[in-house]
Amino acid sequence: MTTEEMIKPENLVYAKPKTMNDTPMHYCPGCSHGVVHKLLAEIIDEMGIQENTIGVAPVGCAVFAYNYLDIDWQEAAHGRAPAVATAIKRLLPDRYVFTYQGDGDLAAIGTAETIHACNRGENIMIIFINNGIYGMTGGQMAPTTLEGMKTATTPYGRNVELNGYPLNITKLLAQLDGTCYVTRQAVHTVAAVRKTKKAIQKGLENSAKRKGTSIIEVVSTCNSGWKLSPDAANKWMVENMFPAYPLGDLKNE
């Protein structure tokens, strides 16, 4: 008998979602990925769709997402998750299909797949983790890296004349006719977590209702890449990332 089974239901404060297994996570302490994974698991449990959900995980920090959530998964080449998800949803239209992508994957090598899947209005949900840096490969500049932000490849800060402007791809995607729901959220506070949970659930419901593409951007921290403690990274995100990428719905049809 497990500890949870021994606890009376009325005394149980927290129970791990059934969709989330006991595999130890590889994410750095303080990383936002783990929180978003837990929200996904909770929503899948509450909606009762574990057997009907398919996730697509490409290369990046979230490449091992399939290790933690007990649903059907398909791994995609770097940046190609929306194309793979398109095929899955068209072949299995009754499934809840989503991709889980970072800023380098979605907004750099995968820009074409992202834009065209959204423009076609594919009935999928795209979860977009934006921490403004390449966290997995050494902290290089990403398309969403802020002006003046230091990275491994911009040690003196991002220079617009040399590196171009930060790419606000979520704002761009909101202008496409194929997107039905585009929102930007975070998971740094309890209130923010609740809003993100509602957004993810709405995105999955839109997939089932065939309304078009839903984009759930989660402005996140990368305390390892930013060289900050988890607490300091949250504060830096609020002070620097939020002004550039303000939270809230960009499109809600």
Image (cartoon, grey):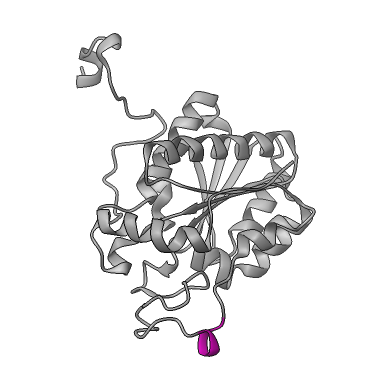
Residue located at (52% from left, 90% from top): 162
Image location of residue 130, percent across then percent down:
48, 60
Residue located at (71% from left, 45% from top): 123
Q: Is residue 1 visible?
A: yes
Q: Which of 159 and 71 is in front in this view?
A: 159
Q: Which of 78 and 111 is in front in this view?
A: 111
Image location of residue 216, percent across then percent down:
57, 48
Classify residue 47 as left or right of residue 115.
left
Image location of residue 81, percent across then percent down:
58, 58
Vertical comparison of 236 with 2: above or below:
below
Q: Which of 57 and 152 is in front in this view?
A: 152
Q: Is residue 70 visible?
A: no
Vertical comparison of 175 with 49: above or below:
below
Residue located at (32% from left, 68% from top): 225
Classify residue 65 as left or right of residue 217.
left
Please identify the quadrant where the C terminus is shown: top right
Vertical comparison of 134 with 248: above or below:
below
| Magenta region, residue range | 160-164
Vertical comparison of 168 with 124: above or below:
below
Classify residue 49 as left or right of residue 208.
left
Residue located at (45% from left, 62% from top): 241
Magenta region, main secondary structure: helix
Image location of residue 97, percent across then percent down:
61, 43
